[in-house]
Image (cartoon, grey):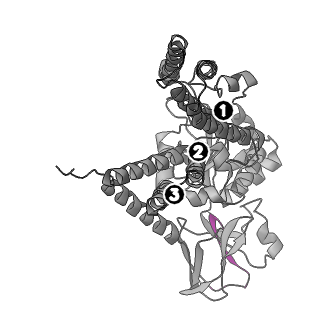
Amino acid sequence: MAALAVRRRGTAAGLAVIGAFAPLAHLVLVLVALGGFVLVPGSGRRRGVALFMLVLMPLALLLPWPAVVIQNPGVVVHGFGALVANPATTAADLVALHPGGPGAWPFVGALVVLAVLAGALVRPGRAALPGLGFAALGGLALALVLLVPMTPLGGATPSTGWAGTPLLIIGWGLVWALLGLCRTGGGKPALVRPAAAIGVAALGALASGVVVAGPVGPLTDGGGTRMASSLTAELADTQRWVLTLDGPPRLTAARLPAFGDDDLAPAPGAAARLGGLRADLLSGESTRVRAALARAAAAGVLFVITPADAAPAFRVAAGDLAGGAPRPPTAGPSSASSSPRTLRAAVTRAGQDRRHRRRPPTSLDSGGVVPVDATPPGAAARVSDGPDGRLLVVGANEEPGWTATVNGRQVPVVRAWGHQVAVPVPTRAADVRVEHSSALRGVLLLVQGAMVLFTVLTSIPGRRPD
């Protein structure tokens, strides 16, 4: 009993690890567990406990990520990782279990397929049916990935996913079927043994393909965006934003983008808004570039990283709104420009109607805003007496979790400049404070930590009785 419980918890931990990197594979394995619970006869409390451990415990170990997956179902199709273009796959690639892209040898997976076909012709048996059924489930996952466009986590437009995870599931199923066909018993060993040898050789080639191919693809060292050390120190001191346009648009605070940032769930509408900023900033038209720079600066952007080939046209169109930045010691494929006036928080002028509040500012030189020294997600300001209609606008996205107080009394949070957090300012002098609460996330992380601790402690095998 104790050994069985330890194995169950180990399996749950393994499923959590798989779900952390490949949600689609995790979903398929959960469906297999549910199908086995329904189809395989049996009863008792043990089956229910086992089902709980295999289905619910991995979700608890992944908190708060399951909520993100539910809100963004495109994660199931696209998975996690950097936003890169999916390599095209042909029918021959799919038959050979080759999803395309670097890191794998083409047509090696075809050896596994041929070994399973040869084994099924020479020694057909029921032992191969579970593996073939699992491979068929992988085929359904492959159809979902290739035929159903979905929006990735940090993307703006729906697209089909990468075939790597479904083909891996199909490969698991075929290996399972091959092991069933190679069981000892009747048949023709003269033919079965060579088929098994071919399958083992194919598995070895698949396992060593990445090692032999070497470090190729988007994870190679030496790429990415670089900035001079003085700019990096300025970012760390000011905690302001960097808008990177060298590739998919990315907005990061106090540092350059890093691998894994694309796995952070963006605020609603952020991907489309950043895509519009990128199109305007790289258009080369002075009016569009200057208006986009004003919108970016109003949101707290201090540096704009543009592709090196687009930097000259960008600086000509931006004029005095974009200052040059020193190049890093090792020049990369990008160029940094700074904004001379960046707002993290500001008090707007009075008399602006709701329609004007919804529009992002097209210029910060009109004197309509008063900068406030703040470091979002928190902002506090002491405002003086003034007319009605003023707003304290913070350079952050308006979303659930923001709270605001005026002289200690809670007031509603409104939206200004298209997407930013704002608080109505009273006519009399007052202390205005804006904060973002992450209490729910903290609770979920505590539950996750407790579940991880429980899983680790209960997975340690105890002393066996003599």
Q: Position of residue 309 (x, y in %)?
A: 70, 31
User: Mark 1 falls on what kind of element?
Assistant: helix
Which is more toward the observer, 400 or 348?
400
Foreground disc of the pair 1, 3:
3
Q: Position of residue 389 (x, y in %)?
A: 74, 81
Would you call the spot at circle 2 few (<14 residues within 10 Å), some (14-19), or many (20 or more)?
Answer: some
Location of residue 321 with respect to 438 vertically, above or below: above
Name the residue that disc number 1 marks: 308
Foreground disc of the pair 2, 1:
2
Residue 306 visible in the snapshot: no
Foreground disc of the pair 2, 3:
3
User: Mark 2 falls on what kind of element?
Assistant: loop
Q: Which portion, as a residue range, is magenta?
A: 385-398
The amino acid type of the residue labelled 3 equals Leu
The residue located at (53%, 39%) in the rendering is 227
Name the residue that disc number 3 marks: 59
User: Mark 3 falls on what kind of element?
Assistant: helix
Name the residue that disc number 2 marks: 80
Most extreme residue toward the front is 186
Res 117 → quadrant: top right
The residue located at (57%, 58%) in the rendering is 66
Residue 189 visible in the snapshot: yes
